Image (cartoon, rainbow, N blue to C red):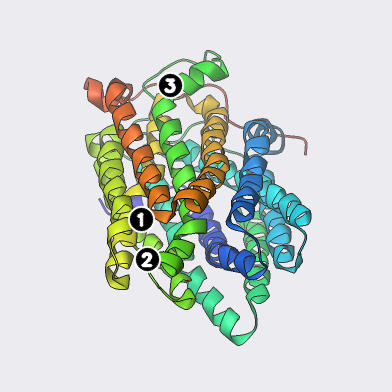
């Protein structure tokens, strides 16, 4: 069967298109933010705490987002979040006060988590049980394409216009994504979806019984640890790897702007392969292998001096560590009932935000006091801790217990009831 036939719902493709546009906006902003703040004279600790304000916005809105999606629908929440992000990223470079920047970064995080939870809820609800990692990998690929193109657009605009123009352009792109979503996306999620192989259930855990947030957390603890580690790593590396390369490796500022390109490039090449492996051999097993290889690449950042070799290590890190995200969401999708997807995804994103919240401040302290190498060592140690955790709870993966997804009656309740909104 051709791979496109695994995705029958056109709304999944619409999410991919909107995500690609957003990915360009993210890629532009991420490639410029550390350099912008450095040019404005902010110290490393201030740069780290500004990133923490971004993560605080994610933490504040992650848990309520499930309720907001249920009340206003995922489409409405997604459209509003795109518009909110467009505003925050567009005004950011024109601010000079730390407090003003912190406030904007908080709302940047709040709107970003609205985008993530809405997209992930739509994709998990509309994908079949045997293709969740595949569907989520294409979602991540859409982001990766944007991340690859965004830094080059930023570099072009910086050279032709100004650094501020890159942020404004990112806001325009997010507004385009909002308009596309409003015009093209179906309002409600389906009561059930059909797997291309005939199954109609998305989970091994049957029944519609209500579960507590604590019970949901226990089911998805491996996914939550994985996303915590990735958020911690990503937020730290985006801010401080360029500075480490400039200060310790003697790499020119212009070359560091394109570092996200290589990370996204590795992700682009391998993420779908990782997803197929996860769907076939077990999601948690795949996450463990990816974390092991990626952690070794983080250590490589310390010992490599060649710019070409450094870019290669960054690409391999992107291929492995970035690939963990869609696989971890797929694991979550097969151990949680459909009607709880929005809540589980909200909890999942709390851990992602917690990693982003803790990573930059801790990394900035280590960077300031002990140097960039020590900062990278502690990031490698975090991935080692995840690998050990996943070994301890390996039976959380249904594949590790020899279970397979079998056809079962679809839940009676829709994930997302209609709203009078």
Q: Picture quarter containing residue 36?
A: bottom right
Q: Earlier in the sequence, mark 1 or mark 2?
A: 2
Percent position of residue 173, x then y: 62, 67
Q: Which mark is residue 318?
A: 1
Q: Are marks 1 and 2 in contact (CB under 8 Å)?
A: yes
Mark 2 sits on what residue? 262
Number of other residues with Cα within 10 Å of mark 2, as a class: few under 14, some 14 to 19, many 20 or more: many
Q: Earlier in the sequence, mark 3 or mark 2?
A: 3
Percent position of residue 280, x then y: 23, 38
Residue in the foreground of this view, choosing between 276 and 242: 242
Percent position of residue 348, x then y: 51, 33
Residue at the bottom extreme of this rendering: 160
Number of other residues with Cα within 10 Å of mark 3, as a class: few under 14, some 14 to 19, many 20 or more: some
- How far separated are the C-alphas under marks 1 and 3? 27 Å
- How far separated are the C-alphas under marks 3 and 2? 34 Å
Q: Which mark is residue 8?
A: none
Mark 3 sits on what residue? 219
Check disc 2 and report its element: helix, strand or loop: helix
Q: Is residue 141 above or below residue 164?
A: above
Residue in the foreground of this view, choosing between 276 and 350: 350
Is residue 231 rendered to the left or right of residue 117? Answer: left
Q: Is residue 84 above or below residue 24?
A: above
């Amino acid at each position: 069967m051709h791979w496109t036939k695994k995705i029958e719902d056109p709304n999944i493709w619409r999410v991919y298109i909107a995500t690609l546009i957003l990915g360009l906006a993210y890629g532009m902003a991420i490639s410029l933010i550390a350099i912008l703040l450095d040019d404005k004279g902010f110290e490393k600790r201030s740069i780290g705490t500004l990133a923490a304000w971004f993560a605080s916005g994610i933490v504040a809105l992650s848990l309520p987002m499930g309720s907001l999606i249920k009340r206003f629908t995922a489409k409405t929440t997604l459209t509003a979040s795109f518009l909110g992000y467009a505003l925050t990223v567009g005004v950011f470079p024109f601010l000079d006060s730390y407090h003003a920047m912190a406030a904007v970064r908080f709302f940047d995080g709040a709107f970003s988590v609205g985008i993530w939870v809405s997209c992930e809820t739509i994709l998990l609800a509309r994908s079949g049980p045997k293709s969740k990692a595949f569907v989520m990998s294409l979602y991540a690929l859409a982001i990766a394409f944007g991340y690859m193109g965004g830094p080059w657009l930023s570099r072009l605009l910086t050279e032709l216009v100004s650094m501020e123009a890159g942020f404004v352009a990112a806001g325009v792109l997010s507004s385009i994504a909002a308009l596309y979503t409003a015009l093209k996306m179906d309002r409600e999620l389906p009561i059930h979806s059909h797997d291309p192989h005939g199954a109609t259930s998305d989970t091994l855990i049957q029944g519609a019984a209500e579960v507590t947030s604590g019970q949901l957390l226990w089911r998805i603890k491996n996914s939550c640890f994985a996303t915590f580690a990735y958020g911690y790593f990503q937020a730290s590396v985006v801010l401080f790897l360029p500075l480490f390369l400039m200060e310790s490796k003697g790499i020119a500022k212009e070359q560091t702007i394109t570092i996200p390109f290589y990370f996204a490039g590795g992700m682009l090449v391998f993420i779908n392969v990782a997803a197929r492996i996860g769907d076939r051999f077990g999601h948690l097993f795949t996450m463990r292998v990816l974390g092991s290889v990626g952690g070794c690449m983080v250590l490589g950042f310390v010992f490599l001096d060649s710019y070409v070799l450094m870019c290669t290590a960054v690409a391999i890190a992107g291929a492995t560590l970035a690939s963990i995200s869609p696989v971890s969401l797929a694991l979550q999708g097969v151990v949680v009932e459909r009607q709880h997807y929005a809540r589980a995804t909200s909890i999942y994103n709390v851990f992602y935000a917690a990693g982003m919240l803790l990573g930059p401040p801790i990394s900035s302290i280590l960077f300031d006091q002990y140097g960039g190498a020590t900062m990278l060592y502690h990031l490698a140690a975090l991935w080692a801790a995840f690998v050990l955790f996943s070994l301890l709870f390996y039976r959380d993966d249904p594949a590790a217990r020899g279970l397979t997804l079998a056809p079962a009656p679809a839940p009676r309740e829709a994930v997302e009831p209609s709203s009078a909104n």
